[in-house]
Image (cartoon, grey):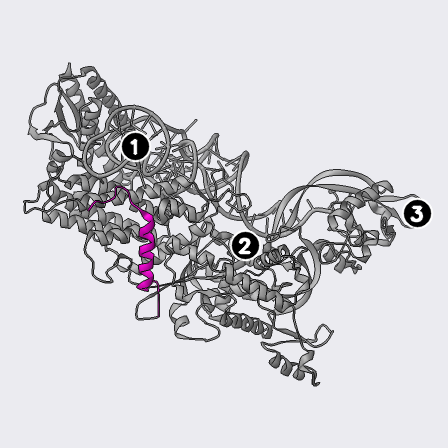
RNA sequence: GGGGGAUUAGCUCAGCUGGUUCAGAGCACCUGCCUUACAAGCAGGGGGUCACUGGUUCGAACCCAGUAUUCCCCACCA
């Protein structure tokens, strides 16, 4: 049978993923084993896979697969988030394209469309994760609007209401005039933009021709002005105290008030106050009992207070009013100005601060245990620098606006029975509400008169229950699953959603289960392109993950994305990294090809093979220990790098070369068997990173029984002993000698095929363990120990012993001399630096014994080497 | 404006409690090789004032202070 020259990823991947599914290896149910639980950060239900998901889910899969091999009951729960704003925006857009306006639909009709959309596009992303090899328990796939999930969201709201932690109130909220909903602070992105500062003059009331000038970036809001504010300490405006001003165009008379809030340095020192349209102005308005004039409609057009601008959009009005103010002599001047403006994360509309009646969660008390348990390390952050950011936020946590003026989501279970501000009750069903209303009002009310709140909850108000509700922890308290799987182990997510999601899950965990939702949080970075820009759909700079997988194989892409991605650092991604991953797959494939081609013969095991086996055993153990350590510290990319080097350098370049029989020569059975066992071990440690090729080769290298798959094989154990350390040190020496030999070949243009003699002048105790390896790897005709120097030879020094390779016909005495002189020069310089230290009395007095001894040894070694070099130089002349 | 990081080779990053892991790795680069596992490869090699300036110390990439550059978070000036 002809083994292909390169590894073909495509068929292999489909085959094994199906096999794993058939065998239900991803499926988990509670048993006697230790649980290892990961809940996926649920992607938007209608989303498609991007590079950020690739990074995030690869890391989770690596952790899960390793845990599975460590004998834990690994459970990775997948699912999707209903993503209320994002999804609703998409559905609205789609309907608009079909000529249907949302406002023409009833709530029920709209939701029907939304569910159709969800059924069509939902879960695409999960299918894509399968291509990546993610070993999620698909039988547990959850959705934040599943019936029992929804029930728990409502329960939590009702519970918080009963505890007095949610309230309804008028607040200045971030209003998205496009999505027509309030947003939380976290959903607003601030961008610096070039804008204009308009200087407008207001006439002082009851004067002939006295004016004051204010500076504003939003001239259209003057129609909502209800005061002018100056700093009481501002000497320039003392004469204005107690006066009134006249608003241009609308000619309303408004008071001039005093408040130290006003920055005397900025603009003109006079501030116009528009309580309805600015957060700070609102606060001022409350303090000074100002009137609040809201001049906008919900969609950002002006209302009847906008005079002749009624019905026009705020940005059009800004342009028009500039002209009118100029024409009428109110506009003194304009200046360029850079300021920060809030944009909706979802629709990119400019946020309008707007007063409205919303539901809020009081966060102060809830946040306390969540802060404490991160700071004291009960929940660990990786990297832990994020604790600072977390603390800063949690110590200044603000109340959470949880109502959204949307239809797609969990409708708020509040029921209104009148127009008064207190005419409502909170209950899960209309029937329960009716009972409560009757208790509250002591009147009999018709159930038909109850009207449910139109709004739905913020998406995160359901997402914060994710680690609990995927196990029905609230609807079926203390069920077997929640008791077994909760708290979950590791959460892998982006730092951007630390507050949106991570913090709130921690809050919910302590509030509802009295326990942390997870033990570790691994923060990934942002995936950027070569130019350092964030990869995004709008920039079009993100490669299509599925195409990458087709091109480089899932294993190659997994490796490419992990190799340079330490926790918390951004990942500058380039497809060449996937190429490296694909090359690595191919390397492993070819190593297998080599081993699988050997024929066994009943023959004696070469000494070199015996030594090689002993050495690789030790090397593997050493590196495995390192890899385990790195995993424990969540240094995933370093664990991969260590694995990569172990396989490529140690196993392929050294071990296989050491034991490789000559062309078409057979191998002894002991060596072959040992090699297969090693191969199996390295496949095991690469399995979490590159599961497909690992499984494929696992089955090719040995006949397997039914169910004997690497995905559930046991993670190797690492042992260490003194003997292992000795052989590792001995190998390092051998490696040095072989490198010297190769160098001599290269410098003298001696082909690898040509055998050479090596003579060793033994100056001190020498270890001969690797002699047979030297002969093989150096392609030596002989290795001989002598007491004399060899004349006319290339030479080098290793561990104080001298090595000679006699010159062939081509000799370059001068070059050899030069090399020796350079080495001598360097060694003398080195000795000098050591002596300097040793002659420093303070160093000798202050340094610990160990350090001193080391320096003395350095001195002795250097002296010895100098002696040898000088002698050799002498003999060359 | 407040807070937190970061700065080590061309790129991405390791470097623990200051001393043989001390200046490292991978990629990239350069030079030889189509040597029958692998050119998606093999062998060898060159790259760094550890951002800068001081200080502490017998000794600093590492500790301290300041400076510069840069990223992130929070709060914002109309």
Q: Which residue is mark 1?
A: A841
Q: Which residue is mark 3?
A: A207
Residue A145 is situated, as x and y percent measured from the top left of the image, at: 52, 67
Say whether marks 2 and 1 touch (CB < 8 Å). Answer: no
Q: Is residue A734 depicted above or below B33 in this figure? A: below
Residue A184 is situated, as x and y percent measured from the top left of the image, at: 61, 58
Q: Earlier in the sequence, mark 2 or mark 3?
A: 3
Discs 2 and 3 lie in a common subunit = yes
Q: Which residue is mark 2?
A: A392
Q: Nearer the viewer, mark 3 or mark 1?
A: 3
Residue A346 sits inside the magenta stretch? no
* Furthest residue in direction top, as rendered: A877
* Furthest residue in direction front, as rendered: A98
Judging from the image, mark 1 belongs to the subunit labelled A
| Distance between the alpha carbons at the discs numbered 3 and 1 | 89 Å
Residue range in magenta is: A1-29
Judging from the image, mark 3 belongs to the subunit labelled A
Judge by depth and name the residue closer to the eye, A838 or B53.
Answer: B53
């Amino acid at each position: 049978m002809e083994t292909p020259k390169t590894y073909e990823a495509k068929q292999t991947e489909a085959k094994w993923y199906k096999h794993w599914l058939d065998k239900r290896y991803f499926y988990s149910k509670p048993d006697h084993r230790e649980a290892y639980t990961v809940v996926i950060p649920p992607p938007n239900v209608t989303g498609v896979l991007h590079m950020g998901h690739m990074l995030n889910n690869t890391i989770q899969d690596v952790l899960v697969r390793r845990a599975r091999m460590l004998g834990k009951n690994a459970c990775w729960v997948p699912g999707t988030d209903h993503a209320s704003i994002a999804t609703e925006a998409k559905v609205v857009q789609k309907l608009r394209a079909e000529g249907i306006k949302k406002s023409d639909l009833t709530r029920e009709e709209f939701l029907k469309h939304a569910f159709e959309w969800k059924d069509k596009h939902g879960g695409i992303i999960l299918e894509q994760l399968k291509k990546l090899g993610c070993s999620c328990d698909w039988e547990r796939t959850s959705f934040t609007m599943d019936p029992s999930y929804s029930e728990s969201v409502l329960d939590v709201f009702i519970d918080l209401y009963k505890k007095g932690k949610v309230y309804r109130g008028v607040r200045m909220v971030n209003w998205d005039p496009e999505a027509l909903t309030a947003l939380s602070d976290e959903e607003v992105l601030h961008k610096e933009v070039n804008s204009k500062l308009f200087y407008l003059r207001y006439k002082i009331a009851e004067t002939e021709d006295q004016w004051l000038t204010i500076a504003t970036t939003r001239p259209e809001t003057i129609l909502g002005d209800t005061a002018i504010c100056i700093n009481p300490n501002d000497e320039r405006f003392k004469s204005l105290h107690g006066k009134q001003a006249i608003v241009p165009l609308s000619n309303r008379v408004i008071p001039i008030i005093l408040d130290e809030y006003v920055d005397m340095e900025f603009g003109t020192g006079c501030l116009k106050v528009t309580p309805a349209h600015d957060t700070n102005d609102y606060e001022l308005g409350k303090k000074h009992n100002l009137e609040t004039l809201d001049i906008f409609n919900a969609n950002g057009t002006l209302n009847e207070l906008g005079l002749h601008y009624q019905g026009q959009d705020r940005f059009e009005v800004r342009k028009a009013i500039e002209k009118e103010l100029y024409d009428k002599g109110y506009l003194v001047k304009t200046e360029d100005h850079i300021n920060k403006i809030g944009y909706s994360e979802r629709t990119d509309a400019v946020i309008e601060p707007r007063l409205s009646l919303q539901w809020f969660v009081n966060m102060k008390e809830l946040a306390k245990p969540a802060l404490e348990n991160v700071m004291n390390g009960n929940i660990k952050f990786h990297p832990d620098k994020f604790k600072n950011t977390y603390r800063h936020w949690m110590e200044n946590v603000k109340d959470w606006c949880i109502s959204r003026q949307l239809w797609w989501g969990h409708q708020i279970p509040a029921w209104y029975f009148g127009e008064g501000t207190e005419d409502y009750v909170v209950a899960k069903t209309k029937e329960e509400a009716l009972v409560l209303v009757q208790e509250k009002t002591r009147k009999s009310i018709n159930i038909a008169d109850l009207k449910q709140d139109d709004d739905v909850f913020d998406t995160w108000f359901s997402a914060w229950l994710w680690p609990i509700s995927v196990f029905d922890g609230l609807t079926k308290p203390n069920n077997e699953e929640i008791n077994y799987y909760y708290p979950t182990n590791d959460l892998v997510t982006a730092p951007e959603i630390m507050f949106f999601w991570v913090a709130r899950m921690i809050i919910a965990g302590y509030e509802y289960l009295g326990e942390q939702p997870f033990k570790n949080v691994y923060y990934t970075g942002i995936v950027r392109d070569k130019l350092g820009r964030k990869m995004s759909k709008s920039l079009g700079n993100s490669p299509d993950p599925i195409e990458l997988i087709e091109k480089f194989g899932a294993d190659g892409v997994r490796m490419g994305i992990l190799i340079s991605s330490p926790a918390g650092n951004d990942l500058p991604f380039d497809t060449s990294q996937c190429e490296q991953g694909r090359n690595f797959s191919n390397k492993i494939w070819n190593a297998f090809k080599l081993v699988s081609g050997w024929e066994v013969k009943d023959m004696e095991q070469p000494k070199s093979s015996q030594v090689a086996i002993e050495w690789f055993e030790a090397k593997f153990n050493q590196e495995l220990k390192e890899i385990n350590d790195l995993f424990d510290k969540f240094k995933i990319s370093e664990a991969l790098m260590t694995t990569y080097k172990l396989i490529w350098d140690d196993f392929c370049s050294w071990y296989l070369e050491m034991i490789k029989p000559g062309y078409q020569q057979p191998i002894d059975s002991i060596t072959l068997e040992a090699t297969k066992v090693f191969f199996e071990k390295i496949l095991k440690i690469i399995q979490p990173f590159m599961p497909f090729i690992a499984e494929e080769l696992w089955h090719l290298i040995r006949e397997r029984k039914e169910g004997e798959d690497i995905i559930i094989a046991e993670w190797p154990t690492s042992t260490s002993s003194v003997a292992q350390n000795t052989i590792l040190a001995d190998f390092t020496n051998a490696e040095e000698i072989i490198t010297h030999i190769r160098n001599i070949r290269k410098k003298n243009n001696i082909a690898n095929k040509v055998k050479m003699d090596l003579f060793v002048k033994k100056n001190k105790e020498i270890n001969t363990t690797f002699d047979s390896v030297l002969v093989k790897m150096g392609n030596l005709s002989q290795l001989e120990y002598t007491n004399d120097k060899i004349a006319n030879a290339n030479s080098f020094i290793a561990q104080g012993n001298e090595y000679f390779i006699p010159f062939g016909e081509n000799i370059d005495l001068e070059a050899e001399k030069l090399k020796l002189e350079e080495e001598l020069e360097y060694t003398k310089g080195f000795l000098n630096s050591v002596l300097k230290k040793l002659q420093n009395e303070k160093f000798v007095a202050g340094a610990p014994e160990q350090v001193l001894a080391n320096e003395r040894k350095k001195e002795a070694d250097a002296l010895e080497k100098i002696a040898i070099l000088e002698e050799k130089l002498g003999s060359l002349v």
